[in-house]
Image (cartoon, helix red, strand yellow):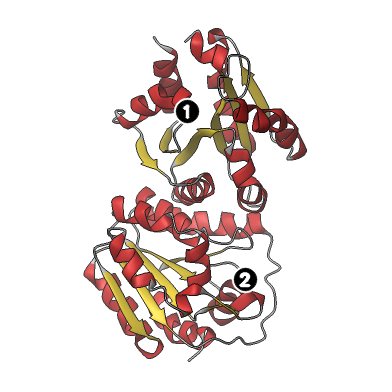
Amino acid sequence: MSVNEKIVADLIKNRVEFVTTVPCKQLAGVIDQIENSDEIFHIPSNKEDEGMGLCAGAYMGGKRSAIIMQNTAIGVTINTLVTLIQYYHIPLPMLISYRGELGEPVACQVEMAVHTKALLAQLNIPTYHFHKADDVNELDAILEYCFMCKKPVAILTDASFWKGA
Amino acid sequence: MIRSEVLKALVPVISDQLVVCNIGLPSQELHLLDDQPSNFYMLGTMGLASSIGLGLALAQNQKVVAIDGDGSVLTNFGTLPTIANNVADNFVLLIIDNGSYGSTGDQPTYAGKKTSLAAVASACGCEHVVECEAEEAAATVQAALDSKQMTIIVCKCESGNIKVPVIDTDPVVIRDRFMKEVKSRNSS
């Protein structure tokens, strides 16, 4: 099973039926898998805060939801994370491509990478960092944890993780 | 008519529907006029009423009315293409367009100037877009609910506010009460 297949299988196993995405090159494969999955409704969003609104609505409608986005989106979504997702206790797994780490060809991506973990820590968001392909084996437990505690949870996936995928 | 009068006229039409209400004065006014477990009040996060409403409509079968404002839609313009391309026929988006940021002191919005939100919604691909005057709001929302077609309503009204108390209900209580109502309506 490929990493992309494993991610989608774990989402389905944890009854995630509604996924919104804002693309990143590293995430192209998993987004394709989501789009082609019969068990998951895929709704691309134009901006990540909009996507979190969609996820909050779907969750209140009885469907577990998740967002797939780039780490630059942390800068876009701080207010939404704090005043919607955290304030109303809405569980939200965030599968995040961690651009700007080792292997990054685009210098500008590093500018947000250096703030990513600090911002997530400041927001008290449980954060997991997938660096090696095997790290994906923890996803199932992370999803279970997220829906148990009804919090946003960040899964940072860096270039080394995707390279080994 | 100002927004609070539009909401008052709407109460008989939306009281029994699932409603997602915009941040600030609109939620406070609706809370004062007709607090219901079927109302979800946004206490923060300007701009996302339409997104929350669409997500809710796509996830379950009951009709959903999202009450939004012109300023909030301008803040989250990306919502209109998403709505247009993910049709939920149980979804009515009501944009109460008073041409101003009412909750922050009635500063003018571009929707009160050259920008037509109805034209933008149509250009984004929304198929049923209706523009109405404040006096027609209740009948227009009722017609949209009866049509069983996803409808975007841009309701023009005057700028102005009444004094209303803030909502002091805990957000988790608002969300939990609303989810239980959604669940019970979908299982009956």
Instruction: Estimate the x, y position of residue B106 in percent, counting from the top left.
Output: 61, 81
Q: Is residue B21 visible?
A: no
Instruction: Estimate the x, y position of residue B117 in percent, counting from the top left.
Output: 39, 70
Assign a secondary structure to mark 1: loop
Q: Residue visible at 56% across and 24% down?
A: A106
- In the displayed structure, A57 sits above or below A6; it is below
Q: Are marks 2 and 1 in contact (CB under 8 Å)?
A: no
Using the image as rendered, state which of residue B100 and residue B88 is in the foreground: B100
- In the displayed structure, A145 sits above or below A136; it is below
Q: Residue visible at 56% across and 38% down?
A: A92
Which dot, 2 or 1, sits closer to the camera?
Answer: 2
Specify whether disc 2 shares its chain with disc 1.
no
**Which numbered disc covers residue B24?**
2
Q: Residue visible at 69% across and 74% down?
A: B166
Mark 1: amino acid: Asn
Instruction: Estimate the x, y position of residue A164 in percent, counting from the top left.
Output: 50, 7
Residues packed near mark 2 inside 10 Å, few (<14), some (14 to 19) or many (20 plus): some
Corner quadrant of residue B44 = bottom right
- In the displayed structure, B98 sits above or below A42; it is below
Assign a secondary structure to mark 2: loop
Q: Residue visible at 45% across and 55% down?
A: B51
- In the displayed structure, A92 sits above or below B21; it is above
In the picture of the structure, the residue carrying the numbered disc 1 is A14
Mark 2: amino acid: Gly
